[in-house]
Amino acid sequence: ANCNRSPLQHEPVGNTWSEDEPLDGCVDLPAFTRNMIGPTAFLLREIGLHDKTAEEISAMDPSTLMLLLFFYYFSLDLLQDIVNYTNAYAMKKVIVVEIVGEGGKKRKKKMKARLQAELAAAQQNCKNWKKLTVGELIVFLGIFMAMAVVNFKRVSHYFYRWDGWCSPDVITDSMKQERFHQIMANLTFRDPDADDPGSRDRLSKIRPVVVRLSERAKKGYVMGQHGAIDESMIATSSRYCPFKQLMRCKPIKNGVKVFCFVDSDSNYLYSFEIYTGKNSSTSDPQVSYILDLICNKLVDVSFNDTGTVCYMDAYFTAPKIFEELKRRGIYAVGPTKSKRPEKKKGRSKWSWPFQTYSKNQSRFVGGKGWMRQAIRSIPGTNATLQATVWLDNKFLHVYSTCFIKDPDDDVTVLRWQKALGKRVHVKAPLSIQWYQKKMGGVDRLDKSNALANIRMKRCQKRYHRAIFFWLLSSFGHHNVKVVFEELLGSERVAQLKKAKDVQFGYFHWFQWTLAKALICKGLQICRNESLDASPNTNAVPAPHFMPTREMIKRPDSNAFSLNPIPHQYVRCSEIKVEVSTGKNKGQIRDLPKARCKQCLKQAVHCKENKGTYKMPDGTTCPRVAKACTVCKVCFCSKECFEMWDRENHAPRPAIISP
C-alpha cells in the first residue's frame, strides 16, 4: 500500500504538484487553428502551377512534376553557386599542386611512395579539369541518384557495357567514369577564397546549402497538427569531422547527428539542425542547448497559438521546455528519465513528483495498466502540466501539457500478454495512446533515406559531402516524394502503384524516374548551351563529359538493360583479399583454399568426423585452390564454375521504367 500511494513531494515550499486538483481548464486534443495544410501557395507559384486546378495537376506527367519539385528545393541559383565554387576550388588545387610539384629533389625523395602517388594523381586530375556547368552538375546528381537503385560495391561497375541485368545504359551513356570521379573529388559548397581561419562555424563548408534548403522547406509546406522531434544520423567515417558522434546502440554508429522536426502524418521534413557540439558558454549547457534547439530553431514562431502537438523522446523532455512551449500555444508530450531526488539533495518545482518505483515493486501496484497522475498549473497561463507514471513491462514516466483526462476514463492500448499468448487491451493514459501513434515520423524518414541509399561510400575525409548527399536524399528525394503524392492525389498515386510497368516497386520506380528525368534535363541544358555557342551549325557535338564525341540518343527509352560483371576462373594466389579479423586485420593476402561451392550443394555433413563433407558417391569434398575473381568462391573444376555462373549470373529480363 505504501508503494502504491506514497506522498507527493512537498518540499520546498512553492511546489504545486497535486493529485486532488480538479481538472478544470485541462485539455484533451487541442483545437487546431490552421485551415490549410500541405503544399503552400508559395511553392505552387515558384514551380508555375499556381494557375492550374487540382485535376490539371493530377493529370500531369509524373516525371515533369518531379523535376519541378526537385528544382524548387535545389534551385538553379543554388546549383550555379555550387558550380562556381567547384570550379574555383579545382583551379585552386591546380595552383597548389604545381607549387608542391616544384619542390626540390631532396624533398621529393623523402616523401613516402603513397604520398607521391597521391600527388601525381591529384596533379593529373587537376590539370585535366574542364569547367563544370549547371547541366553537367544536374547530370551528375541524376547519375548519383540512379546508382542507388542498383547497389554495386564499386563505382566502376556502373560504367560497364555488357548485356544482362546489372548496369543501366542511362548511366553508361551519360558520363565518363573519369569525369564522374573528377566532379566527386572537387565538389565544393562554399567559396574557397573566403576561408576564415578564425571562424567558429563548424558547418562553414556546407552552410550555404543548409541555409537555403532550410528556408525552402519551411516556405513550401504547412505542417499538420502533430509533429515529431527526434535525432537522425548521417553516416561518415571522416577523420577530419570535429563533431562526429559515436552511438553504439544505433544502426549508424559513426556519423553526424541531426535533430529533425517531421510531420507525423505525411513524414515531411520541416526543419533540422546539425549538431556541432554543446554550447560551453552557459552554466547549464545541456538544458540551455535543448531549450534553444526546440523553442527557437526547430519549432519556430509560425507555430505559435496554432494548437500544434510536439512528440519527443526522453532526450528532449523537460518541464521547462514544455512550459515554454505552452506559453506560446504549443503542446508537447514526451517520456522522461527523471527521478525524484532525495530531500538532502534538494527538490524544486521542476522535480519529478513521485517516488522511484523499481521493477520488483510492480506486483504491489496491480499489474499492467496501473497508473498514477499529478498535475500542476503553469505560471502565466491557465494551462496545466501533467506527470504520469504508468506500468507496462516496466514503469514509464511521461510529461504532457495535453491529453489530460481522468484516469477512470476508458482508454486502452494493445500489449502482449505472455501467459495468454496474444495481445490484449490494457488501460493506459491518453497521452501514451497518442504518443504511440504519432512519434514515428523521424524513423520513417530514416527508413526512406536507407531505402534510397543516396550516400557516399566509406570515406575518411569529405564529411561535408556526406552531409550534402543526406540533404539530397532528404529534400531532393523524400520531401519531393511527399509533395508529389499530395499534389497528384491518392487516386492517381494508387494507379501508379498498381501499374504493370512498376516491376521493382513504387519507391524505386519513383527514384529511378526522377534520376532519369534529371539526366535528360541536364543533357538538354548542355545541348542548348552548345546551340547558343554555335547557332549556324547543323550537327551539335556531344558534351565533353559523354563517352563519345557524337550526340548519343537521348536516354528516353522505356526499357533499359543491366549487365553482369565478367567472372574469371583463376588460381587463388591471383586473388587478393583483406583480412577482416584477428591480429592481421586490414592486411592483404591471397584468397585461402576452400571447398567447392557448387559441390557443397550436394554434399552432406559427416557427423562422425566434424568438419568433413561427403559427396553422394562417398568421396570427401576437398579444399581446392582455384576460384572466381569476382565472387571469391572456390571451385574444383571449370565445369562447376560455369554451372555456378549460369545459375547465379544468367541474364535476366530488362527492368521496365515507365
Image (cartoon, rainbow, N blue to C red):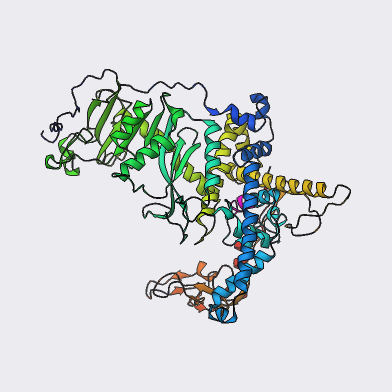
Front position in the image: 500 or 85: 85
- In which quadrant of the rendered view does residue 130 lie? bottom right
Q: Image point 67% across, 31% down: which residue?
A: 48
Front position in the image: 319 or 599: 319
Q: Image point 20% across, 43% down: which residue?
A: 359
Magenta region: 143-151
| Quadrant of the drawing holding the N terminus | top left
| 612 to 149, vertically: above or below | below
Q: Is 147 covered by the magenta stretch?
A: yes
- In which quadrant of the rendered view does residue 320 lie? top left
Confirm whether residue 556 shows in the render: no
| 606 to 374, vertically: above or below | below
Front position in the image: 113 or 248: 113
Q: Is 297 covered by the magenta stretch?
A: no
Question: Where in the figure is residue 148, as x and y percent of width and height?
Answer: 58, 52
| 156 to 243, vertically: above or below | below
Q: Image point 34% across, 47% down: which residue?
A: 281
Front position in the image: 239 or 205: 205
- In which quadrant of the rendered view does residue 412 lie? top left
